[in-house]
Image (spheres, grey):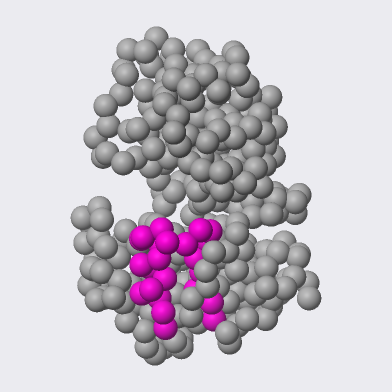
Amino acid sequence: MKAAWYERQGSAASVLVVGDLAEPEPGPGEVRIRVAASGINPGDVKKRQDAFRVGMPFPRVIPHSDGAGTVDKVGESVSASRVGEHVWCFGAQTYRPFGTAAEYVVVPSEQAVPLPDRICLEQGACLGIPGITAHRAVHAAGSVDGRVVLVQGGAGAVGQCAIALARQAGALVIATVRSVGDRDVAQRAGAHHVIETSGRGATAIIDLVRSWAPRGVNHIIEVAFDQNITADEPLLVLGGSIAAYATGSPTPAIPFWPLVFKNVRLFFLGSDDFPPVDKQAAAGALNEALRGGWPGFEIGARFPLESIAAAHEAVERRTVTGRIVITFPGAAQGLNISTDG
């Protein structure tokens, strides 16, 4: 099979190799997917860069945890009826060496999720990491039904999923974005109210949130914990909560006593290590959102496998608006058409 891999960490152009490898075979409890689209997440880029200084987890890594395609083989104890299913997968390169940047990938059967009818495969390739992170971020502190949820960074991949899932769960959703173009993205995801932060100071942003939530915010989903925590704190109600999944500074300062006096709960979320039951709940909720009319992501660029280095560089440099995917022409059936034909 054609695949991309690296055997050392570094810049995309210097370490990513495209060539031929043996096709993988599914073991017990596993399925093999003929990959139609492979989604690229910032975490995939950081692993390749060794951004967190953990080194090479395996001698050879095929990158990308998320993807979508068609099940073409199953291992022992998996029903043969799964063959032919259009699926999206998550965690392909989580504690495993070989991800979705290849014509075939093998994953545990429960990590290959049937894609709803009429949803294209490249959309499915973008769901895993952001969608599962968002679901946990929305529900970490309990039910949000009837509550006010603030999504910081509502135009990002996790932010869009969080908006859709929080609205699906019955919340009033307020989102912050950087620009007019980002406003459209957050509204498309389902935000009730959107605040453009560019050119506005923290006080003005707080006042705008309060204009829609005069009693305060119950739960905040946070993409920039270090930058926003001092503005998040005054917005929270007594007993409110924050679910943070990213930060600029690895050692952020926090307003400790104000958070203490409000009995604020902080959740720090790393999607690789969510309990399996939470990942399955997230997969079900994401499919439900798609069936319910959530339009999902805009695909900003499609690259062939041979151009994977350029695709990684586009993610790093943020030169593309929307999600970036690697596509495989040989498995293109169903890529941009409905999964039910």
> Residue at horizontal 59%, vertical 13%?
215
Which residue appears at 44% of the width and 20% of the height? Answer: 203
Q: Total of numbered circles in the picture?
A: 0
Q: Is the residue 58 above or below the residue 262 in the image?
A: below
Q: Is residue 336 visible?
A: yes
Asked if residue 64 is among those painted magenta in the image, a careful observer would answer no
Q: Considering only vertical position in the picture, is 141 above or below 183? A: above
Q: Quadrant of the C terminus?
A: bottom right
Q: Which residues are magenta?
A: 306-328
Rendering coords of residue 312 (x, y %): 38, 68
Specify whether 294 is left or right of 280: right
Q: Is residue 151 above or below residue 309?
A: above
Q: Is residue 24 above or below residue 140?
A: below
As drawn, is 175 to the left or to the right of 290?
A: left
Residue at the limit of the structure toward the right, as seen here: 341
Q: Which sits in the foreground, 305 or 314? A: 314
The answer to which image quadrant residue 22 occupies is: bottom left
For this orientation, the residue located farthest to the top is 261
**Residue occupying the point 58% across, 76% down:** 36
x and y percent of residue 222 in the render?
A: 45, 35
User: Residue 66, position in %: x, y?
Assistant: 50, 64
Q: Quadrant of residue 110?
A: bottom right
Q: Residue 28, can we see it?
A: no
Residue toward you, 229 or 331: 229
Residue at 48%, 34% (x, y): give it: 197
Q: Locate residue 87, reporting x and y percent.
A: 63, 68
Most extreme residue toward the front, as rendered?
199
